[in-house]
Amino acid sequence: MITIRQASVNDAEAIASCLLLAMDTIIYQFIGEENERKAEAFLAYFTTKENNQYSYQNCWVAEKENIIIAAANIYDGATLEELRLPVLQYLKKEFGNDINPEDETEAGEFYIDSIGVQTDERGKGVGSQMLQFLVDEYAVRRGKNLGLLAEEANASAKRLYIRLGFKRVGEKIFMGKKMEHLQLKGKRK
């Protein structure tokens, strides 16, 4: 049985491992090299800290038999600039990478940045369960709009998003890649 709960600082290493599985190419662009060890260390650094994009404060984890098998990173789109700032400062200082990524979200939505599932748990519906949980928690229980970006080439993920009620609201360019911006309107019970 899978349990989904708000993450704690003690989950930071497991969160970093899961998020890297979902974001590897983007993190490699951030750090300026394709180095899994450095990329995971970068994410682990930020998942332990508060008040940043990848903080444990903005994550939920899925556990099976007390082992974290997936993590979701979600935050208020209105806070993107302030949450991103420490990340960009760190990238410049530690990696010499002075990047300025496009805004992937905006005010008026809680943004699902990424959902990462451990490799040996993929194909078992864990990612779908995490996404359904986020829909129930944010759109239904809290009445908040949810947003995410979908790669046009990932048709199966897009079908899942549409099935859960997400609708296309536009396009965004993120890290040089054209993405579809999908949203699910909040519907508090």
Image: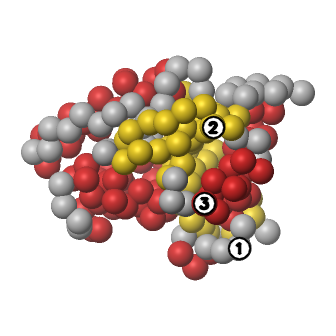
The residue carrying mark 3 is: 155
Query: At 37% from the left edge and 41% from the top edge, which residue is drawn?
Result: 174
Query: Would residue 177 be found to the left or right of residue 67 on screen?
Result: left
Q: Indicate the quadrant containing the C terminus: top left, top right, bottom left or bottom right.
A: top right
Question: What's under tag 1, amino acid-wise?
Answer: Lys
- Mark 3 or mark 1, earlier in chain: 1
Q: Residue furthest right?
A: 189
Label 1: state its secondary structure.
loop
* Label 2 Cα crowd, 10 Å radius (few <14 / some 14-19 / many 20+): some
Image position, residue 52 (x, y; %): 39, 34
Query: At 80% from the left edge and 33% from the top edge, which residue is drawn?
Result: 140
Q: Which mark is residue 168?
A: 2
Query: Would residue 97 be found to the left or right of residue 37 on screen?
Result: left
Position of 82 relative to 12 (above/below): above
Viewer-side residue, 169 vs 87: 169
Image position, residue 158 (x, y; %): 63, 53
The way the protein has been coloured in the rendering is secondary structure
- Mark 2 or mark 3, earlier in chain: 3
**In this rendering, does residue 120 appear at all?**
yes
Query: At 76% from the left edge and 42% from the top edge, which residue is drawn?
Result: 165
Looking at the rendered image, the disc whose residue lies closer to the viewer, 3 or 1, is: 3
Mark 3 and mark 1: Cα distance apart in space: 18 Å
The residue carrying mark 1 is: 124
Mark 1 and mark 2: Cα distance apart in space: 26 Å
Position of 31 relative to 117 (above/below): above
Question: What's under tag 3, amino acid-wise?
Answer: Ala
**In this rendering, does residue 58 appear at all?**
no
Position of 44 relative to 113 (above/below): below
Image position, residue 40 (x, y; %): 33, 61
Question: What's under tag 2, amino acid-wise?
Answer: Arg
